[in-house]
Image (tube, rainbow, N blue to C red):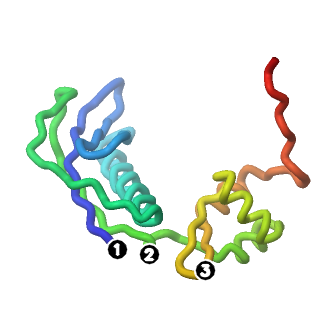
Amino acid sequence: MHFGVYEFEVFQEEGRFIAVPYDMEGATQGEDFEDLCLMVADWLKMHIEDWEIAGKELPTPTFGNKPRHGGTNMVFGISAGIETIEKVTASEAARMLGVTQGRVSQMIKDARLYGWREGRNAYVSLDSVRARLTEKPRAGRPLKVAAAL
């Protein structure tokens, strides 16, 4: 598990609160300041989990940066890692989705599910399984889209 502490510039734009990190790509937003703080925590958690799964080093944080959008600098921190991801085994995901384990592997390869290996075990994030269930895909093979001529 990692404890990530990063500086963000926080500003308002078109009625929304925006937070832009200095040491990584992307940004997040919230409807009000409280919502923004929750969104920053979720954003950091997701990025730290992704870096750990990919075996990447977390970016080195910098502090005392000069605001680029006329906002205020704030520091946010969160503990996260592979242990904080709600997960199921690949076989549990297959059962939940009503497909074979082979299909789960293909869905991970096609980025339709978010999965990874820990040693000999394969896991799938519970959020990606829930999202797939919400999509209610039709049975059968996906249609191939003809290329434009």
Disc sitting over residue 147 in the figure: none
Q: Eyeballing the image, is 7 above or below 70?
A: below
Q: Nearer the viewer, residue 109 or 126?
A: 109
The percent position of residue 123, horizontal first and vertical second, equals 60, 72
Q: Give how far apart the Cα atoms at labels 2 and 1 are.
A: 7 Å
Answer whether labels 2 and 1 touch (C-beta < 8 Å).
yes
Residue marked by disc 3? 121
Q: Is residue 81 above or below residue 17?
A: below
For marks 2 and 3, give the one nearer the viewer. Answer: 3
Judge left or right: residue 59 versus residue 97. left
CA neighbours of label 3 inside 10 A, class few (<14), some (14 to 19), many (20+): few
Under circle 3, the secondary element is strand
Q: Secondary structure at mark 2?
A: helix
- Residue at image coords 73%, 76%: 91
Figure quadrant of residue 26: top left
Where is residue 30 shown, x and y percent of the image? 37, 41
Task: Say if mark 2 contacts mark 3, CB within 8 Å.
Answer: no
- Of the numbered discs 3 and 1, the one sitting upstream in the chain is 1
| Position of residue 98 in the picture relative to residue 48 (left or right) | right
Q: Position of residue 37 (x, y in %)?
A: 31, 50
32, 13: nearer the viewer: 13
Q: Which residue corresponds to mark 1?
A: 1
* Mark 3 vs mark 1, CA separation in Å: 19 Å
At a point 19% along the width and 29% down the height, the residue shown is 68
Residue carrying label 2: 83
Q: Amino acid at mark 1?
A: Met
Question: Are discs 3 and 1 less than 8 Å apart at CB?
Answer: no
Query: In the image as oriented, which residue stretches furthest toward the bottom?
Result: 120
- First of labels 2, 1 by sequence position: 1
Toward which corner of the image does residue 121 lie, by quadrant? bottom right
